[in-house]
Image: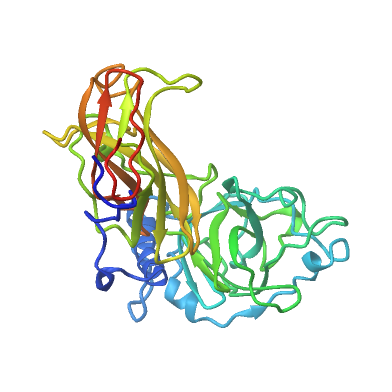
Amino acid sequence: MLSMGRAAVRGGDSAADPARRRSRRARTVAALAAGTLVLSLGACEALPSLPGSGSAAPSSGDPSAAPAMDPDAVAAAESVPVDPSWLCRPGEGEPLAPSTEGGTFTPEAVHTEGGDIQVSGSFRLAPDHDYRGFAPEGVLLPADPENRGVPAPGFDGELGVEGAPVPPIVVRGRVEVPGEGPAPQAATARLTLGTCDDAPLPDGQFLLRLRGGVDGPGRGEEDAGWGASGDVLVDVVDGRPEAVPGAVTAPSGEVPAELSPLGCRAELAPVGDGDGLTVTVEDPSVQVPTAVPDGEDGAAVSGAVTVTSQDHGTRALLQGIVLTDPATGAVVAGARNTPEISLRWIGAEGVTRTERAWTSHGACGADALAPGQYEARAVAVTINAEGGTHLVLSDPWDVEVVEDDAVQEQAGPGEPAS
């Protein structure tokens, strides 16, 4: 029976000590450093040059490539103004160069500071194009609330032309890196964000679409240019841009996750320190029948699972309910085997969803759970800025699977089931 008063449970097993929780902005700094290392080591390339260390050697895998740009040097460089009038007054200016066939920029790390956003990643230029510096152009598109990885309806077409919508955020400045000769093996784009009317940045989810010219700073000659391999995920929280923890781009609106701790027969236990998440459940089932109730898809343990975070914005998030065998702690129902987690916006009220762990079908090792006593928990899974998976568990409650379909009336606050 449930003995927790209002049938609400807290994230007890893996709730992080507030002193151990890091702010989201601090995590983006770590993500930038980690991403820079990955983009150099992951392809067996030389490390980017560091301040005072001189230039790094070109990649042994691409002898024609120049050393990677130093993100610290780009961050310290002076920004130059960008005229966003072509976006602010659609049809009156010159849209971006249409072609991005000259090269590819692959975003791998994101850092934000104030109203600036900095993106680092590998850069490859086609052999028939000349490198004359790196001057990124960017467009901020509102994200589709139903699919975080694609633009919102109305912003998925050409911008800057007559009749096109005006983006709520535009680029007002950028760092231009001069150069001539071999293209760098990795590049860093730094942009200053603003609005057409100099208003504060609006909160929400956005996609940064990066591109630029390859035959000279600014727009490319003869329609040549480079484009990013994917749109960069950007949130604005309290008027400040922020990176999305654990994800740089996500065309599908989902990111990979390690969910083996929620697999069938896995011994359920928290993973990580919770990364600032708390999970609660209200009105959980305490008794379910073996028979399927009329008009239902099946019998299940259900409850309203709410996940909250100290840091608001987009997070990789999976929430649910799982049942375990109280004798072994092994998952017997509600297992998850998906390789990806959806990206969801977590605001001050958190995210609440009615979740179910089916007991009449799809149970581990059997079509349905046998009658008996089980233990249930609400769960939440997220991914931090370094890509590590965190599994947060609520306190457990007892669930009984009964032979007939005469389910006892669910207990009220502090009351036993009748």
Front residue of 125/8: it is 8
Quick one: which residue is furthest to the left in this view?
A: 327
Front residue of 372/326: it is 372
Residue 156 is situated, as x and y percent measured from the top left of the image, at 71, 48
Residue 372 is situated, as x and y percent measured from the top left of the image, at 20, 25
The relative height of residue 225 versus residue 326 in the rendered view (above or below) is below
Left or right, residue 393 beside residue 54:
left
Q: Residue at x 30, y 31 (%)?
A: 287
The relative height of residue 245 versus residue 270 in the rendered view (above or below) is below
Q: Quadrant of the C terminus?
A: top left
Residue 46 visible: no
Residue 44 is situated, as x and y percent measured from the top left of the image, at 32, 52
Left or right, residue 213 beside residue 330:
right
Quick one: which residue is furthest to the front in this view?
A: 418
The relative height of residue 378 versus residue 94 in the rendered view (above or below) is above
Front residue of 52/408: it is 408
Residue 295 visible: yes
Q: Residue at x 47, y 45 (%)?
A: 353
